[in-house]
């Protein structure tokens, strides 16, 4: 067992037997020794100690579990051992060695101890932490509720000392007390801790119109006394929710760091931080908005959604993630209720029959027929669906072959591919899951926007505009989740946010354009919204969409830019642009449909460009 070498010269074993049990100085180096070690050091028996002297330094340690009172029988055993060890080692060694114990003078000890109970009912508190602040002594107490601190004086006649004792347990208010300790006179200092008050956190989750929204709410709590934990609640059809029996905030013993709100489709989730729960009324009203887009996770194992949601978040786009593994077929009929009539649908590691079942193909086709827009991406899609009406007539490609090419590039003359100089789709900074990248053969109506880099003429991505239903589709024959800029930043290598921004801009009808009158650095000098073209616009005849151009100058104060359509009553009809502000010259398109994908009626409409404090409004006449 472990023991301490005692090295205080000049104190004999006889003197030791007269010392008090407490307050004896023992110094030395901690060692670990076994019976075999003793035999090895001791050597063979010899007739006389004089011919083979050995020096052993011995101590007696009695260990008990924290919170357990030593039995009297064991204490008696220790006393008998202490009293008899002088004769034992002189009589029983048989000449094998000479045992010496060297001890220092006795010094007084200051002691404070007590029992910690519940102030409400007197019960003993478990899982307690006691701390003596001045000495930085910390004592965890798992059972029994008993704490004890001892300190040895540095002289034989020390002065009294003060001790600040802090007792903490969950769920109780911390207890701090200051006591005076006299050496040689143990102090009994019992304490009672006051339980933390409990209360409720109530509130409601509603949309902007005041309608109740069903949601799951998760409250994250942290503590430096116990492990962090969570509490959950759900809101009903009226949006009302209650967290019952919460302890009032008492940092750092208990603090509520964040509340995660996950509303039902089509609303975007929210995270509220630093929730304070008081002893009074705690009401929290949460207003949620529809997410920008619907993100369908169609990976067989439900993986990879974070690669999409993080890219969207970085460009300021909110999403509602629908995992088909957990929730079944995505309800694409909700898509018009999102701020942008866009669905991102990815298949991850799906292959063969796992890739887009007939029901899933029908759902995507129905969304396109309603004038919706789709970003479809995944390895194996073209290979698994080759020759099907969906791939031929909707995506308008056929499958050529698989290609193990980890570098791609955007077509620089294309609005989706512009600026995407190098795209890596392998490596640990992405999903690193691409084993079957598809080479595509575009048919009529499909325009190549992304190419494989090392094999000339091999198409990796296309875009499709369908004038029959005014829908748009971008299709990648590889998984967007694998895209990353590489481990070392290099000019021209883009990540997922840049690729996603280009795709969504085109699907939304927003493209950056060049202008012959732009400033030398390419940044407009003024905030400007041009008249739409054509105007008047005869929807359904001639131009399928009206084009709206706008200029954004350098503005350090602006955070976001929006371009919205309103009717003559001031009601919002459609949102064409809602994204982080960046200077440049842009073009947006409106297809004459509202946020639900329905064609609007004839009449006058206004479109407003707003960025921070800057805004500009123009008028457009729609006729049929």
Image: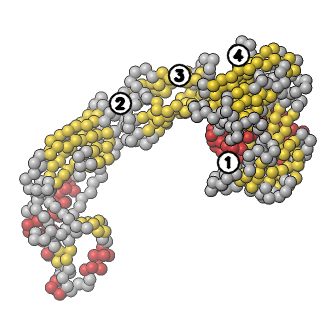
Q: CA distance from mark 2 to mark 1?
A: 49 Å
Say whether disc 3 or disc 2 marks the residue closer to the N-terminus: 2
Q: Which residue is mark 3?
A: 285
Residue 418 left/right relative to 400: left
Quadrant of residue 332 within the rendered picture: top right
Q: Quadrant where the C terminus lies?
A: top right
Say whether disc 1 or disc 3 marks the residue closer to the N-terminus: 3
Q: Which residue is mark 2?
A: 196
Q: Residue at the location (33% across, 45% down)?
A: 142
In this rendering, the label closer to the viewer, 4 or 3: 4
Where is residue 375 drawn, in percent x and y? 77, 39
Where is residue 366 drawn, in percent x and y? 83, 31
Mark 2, other Cα within 10 Å: few <14 / some 14–19 / many ≥20: some
Q: Which residue is mark 1?
A: 495
Q: Which residue is mark 4?
A: 571
Residue 590 left/right relative to 562: right
Residue 237 or 261: which is nearer the viewer? 261
Q: Is residue 59 above or below residue 127?
A: below
Q: CA distance from mark 1 to mark 4?
A: 38 Å
Q: Secondary structure at mark 3?
A: strand
Where is residue 580 drawn, in percent x and y? 64, 34
In this rendering, the label closer to the viewer, 1 or 3: 1
Say whether disc 2 or disc 1 marks the residue closer to the N-terminus: 2
Q: Secondary structure at mark 4?
A: loop
Q: Residue at the location (14% across, 66% down)?
A: 103
Residue 511 or 431: which is nearer the viewer? 511
Say whether disc 1 or disc 4 marks the residue closer to the N-terminus: 1
Q: CA distance from mark 1 to mark 3?
A: 37 Å
């Amino acid at each position: 067992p472990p023991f301490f070498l005692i090295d205080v010269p000049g104190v004999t074993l006889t003197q030791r037997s007269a010392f008090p049990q407490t307050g004896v100085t023992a110094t030395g180096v901690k060692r670990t020794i076994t019976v075999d070690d003793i035999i090895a050091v001791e050597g063979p028996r010899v007739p006389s100690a004089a011919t083979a002297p050995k020096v052993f330094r011995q101590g007696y340690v009695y260990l008990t579990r924290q919170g357990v009172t030593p039995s009297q029988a064991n204490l008696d055993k220790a006393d008998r051992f202490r009293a008899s060890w002088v004769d034992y080692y002189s009589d029983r060694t048989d000449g094998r060695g000479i045992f010496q114990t060297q001890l220092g003078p006795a010094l007084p000890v200051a002691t404070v101890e007590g029992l910690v109970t519940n102030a409400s009912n007197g019960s003993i508190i478990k899982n307690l932490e006691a701390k003596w602040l001045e000495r930085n002594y910390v004592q965890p107490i798992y059972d029994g509720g008993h704490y004890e601190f001892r300190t040895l004086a540095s002289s034989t006649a020390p002065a009294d000392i003060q001790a600040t004792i802090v007792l903490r347990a969950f769920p109780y208010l911390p207890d701090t007390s200051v006591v005076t300790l006299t050496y040689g006179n143990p102090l009994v200092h019992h304490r009672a801790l006051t339980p933390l008050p409990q209360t409720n956190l109530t509130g409601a989750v509603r949309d902007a119109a005041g309608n109740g929204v069903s949601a799951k709410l998760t409250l994250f709590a942290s503590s430096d006394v116990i492990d962090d934990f969570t509490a959950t609640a759900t809101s009903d059809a009226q949006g009302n929710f209650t967290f019952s029996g919460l302890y009032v905030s008492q940092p750092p013993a208990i603090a509520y760091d964040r509340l995660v709100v996950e509303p039902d489709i089509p609303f975007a989730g929210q995270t509220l931080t630093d929730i304070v729960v008081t002893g009074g009324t705690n009401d929290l009203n949460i207003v949620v908005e529809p997410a920008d887009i619907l993100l369908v996770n169609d990976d067989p194992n439900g993986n990879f959604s974070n690669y999409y949601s993080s890219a969207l978040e970085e460009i300021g786009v909110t999403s509602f993630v629908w995992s088909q593994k957990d929730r079944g077929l995505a309800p694409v009929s909700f898509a018009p209720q999102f701020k942008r009539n866009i669905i991102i649908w990815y298949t991850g590691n799906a292959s063969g029959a796992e890739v887009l079942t007939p029901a899933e193909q029908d759902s995507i086709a129905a969304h396109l027929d309603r004038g919706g827009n789709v970003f479809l991406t995944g390895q194996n899609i073209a290979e698994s669906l080759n020759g099907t009406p969906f791939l031929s007539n909707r995506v308008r490609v056929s499958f050529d072959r698989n290609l193990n090419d980890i570098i791609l590039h955007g077509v620089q003359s294309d609005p989706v591919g512009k600026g995407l100089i190098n795209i890596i789709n392998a490596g640990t900074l992405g999903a690193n899951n691409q084993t079957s990248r598809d080479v595509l053969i575009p048919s009529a109506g499909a325009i190549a926007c992304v190419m494989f880099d090392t094999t000339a003429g091999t198409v990796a991505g296309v875009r499709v505009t369908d004038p029959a239903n005014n829908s748009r589709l971008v299709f990648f024959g590889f998984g967007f989740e694998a895209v990353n800029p590489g481990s070392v930043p290099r000019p021209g290598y883009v990540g997922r946010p840049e690729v996603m921004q280009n795709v969504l801009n085109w699907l939304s009808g927003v493209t950056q354009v060049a202008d012959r009158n732009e400033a030398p650095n390419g940044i407009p000098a003024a905030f400007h919204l041009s008249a739409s073209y054509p105007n008047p616009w005869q929807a359904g005849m001639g131009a399928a969409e009206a084009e709206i151009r706008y200029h954004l100058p350098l503005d350090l104060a602006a955070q976001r830019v929006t371009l919205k359509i309103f009717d003559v009553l001031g009601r919002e009809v459609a949102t064409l642009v809602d994204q982080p502000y960046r200077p440049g010259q842009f073009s947006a398109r409106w297809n004459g449909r509202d946020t639900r994908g329905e064609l609007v009626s004839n009449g006058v409409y206004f479109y407003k460009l707003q960025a921070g404090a800057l805004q500009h409004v123009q008028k457009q006449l729609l006729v049929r």
